[in-house]
Image: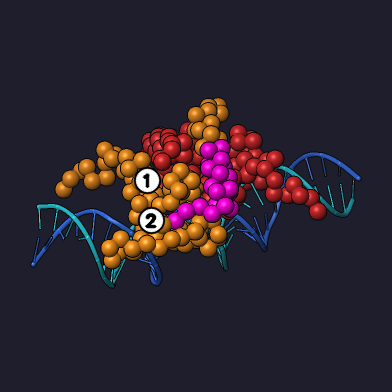
Chain colours: A red, B orange, C blue, D cyan
Amino acid sequence: MFAFYNSNITMIYSSELIKGTLKTIVLKLLSDNNRMYGYEITQKVKELTGDKIQITEGALYPTLHALESDGLLSVETEFIGKRVRKYYSLSTSGKQKSQEKISELADFMNTMKYLLDIKTA
Amino acid sequence: MFAFYNSNITMIYSSELIKGTLKTIVLKLLSDNNRMYGYEITQKVKELTGDKIQITEGALYPTLHALESDGLLSVETEFIGKRVRKYYSLSTSGKQKSQEKISELADFMNTMKYLLDIKTA
DNA sequence: AACTATGCATAACATTCTTATGTATGTTTG
DNA sequence: CAAACATACATAAGAATGTTATGCATAGTT
């Protein structure tokens, strides 16, 4: 057996950290890319994070559906050969929401950075 | 009615962001402070974050119990007058775990900062 | 006397993931 | 050319981890 199985050579973040950030990540990517489909989003995140963040399909697709039913995304279904592909893009309210969520997360991270760095002794 | 009800004058982060960071926050505070009790932790976090992060008791106490049963924390019960107070401090493995979780979160935040800032167009 | 703060605890519920499973097409490789 | 891998969607059961509500009790403030 290999002892490297759970090593940090490629550190994948413990899943709980991703929680709560997924919607923001999706909205951010869509605000930069006009339109994307689900599988593309998973690959883009992997690529941009050097495999550190891997979005599972079980998490992504329900999230996309939720964002859509909240009116933040619009969808266009296309066929590549016989295979379906669903392109998502931000609606007007989605663009606004996107900015809000990005700001909030950026602010939160500053706060967390402060919390982690300070010595409170 | 007041329109300021949900305003951002004092922006409290949407709760989903806190998820997954609570254990790390607790471990960090304990690594800086030798020993602390639950209520003190909630107040310290409020103070350090300018009320932006408010840890609820319903989240904190179960978390402290979980960290304790994982052997990361040890407890000393004291009485202030007639009122009980439970002081928590890091065990040896808790100190190690604390460092790991802090590193992971710091790394995660760098990754997220990159993800949020970059333009992928 | 009433209200607020300190200090613990737990239970019902909600949210949001993971893991597993399902279906189907397209591409690469031994 | 068969098997394996990659692309592409979807959903359901279960786990994890919060919120909200409630409960109890003591201490301080108005």
Measured along the vertical axis of the image, is residue A59 above or below residue B119?
below
Q: Which residue is mark 2?
A: B38
The rendered magenta stretch, by its main secondary structure, is classed as helix
Residue drawn 67% across and 43% down? A8
The chain carrying label 2 is B
Residue A11 numbered tag: none
Residues marked 2 and 1 touching at CB (< 8 Å): no
Measured along the vertical axis of the image, is residue B23 above or below residue A109?
below
Is B91 part of what is drawn in magenta? Answer: yes
Is circle 2 on the same chain as circle 1? yes
Picture coordinates of residue C29, whole percent (x, y): 86, 41
Residue drawn 46% across and 36% down? A117
Which amino acid does the dot numbered 1 rest on? Val
The chain carrying label 1 is B
Q: Which residue is mark 1?
A: B45
Q: Is residue D21 left or right of residue A13?
A: left
Task: Tell me the CA gap for discs 2 and 1.
Answer: 11 Å
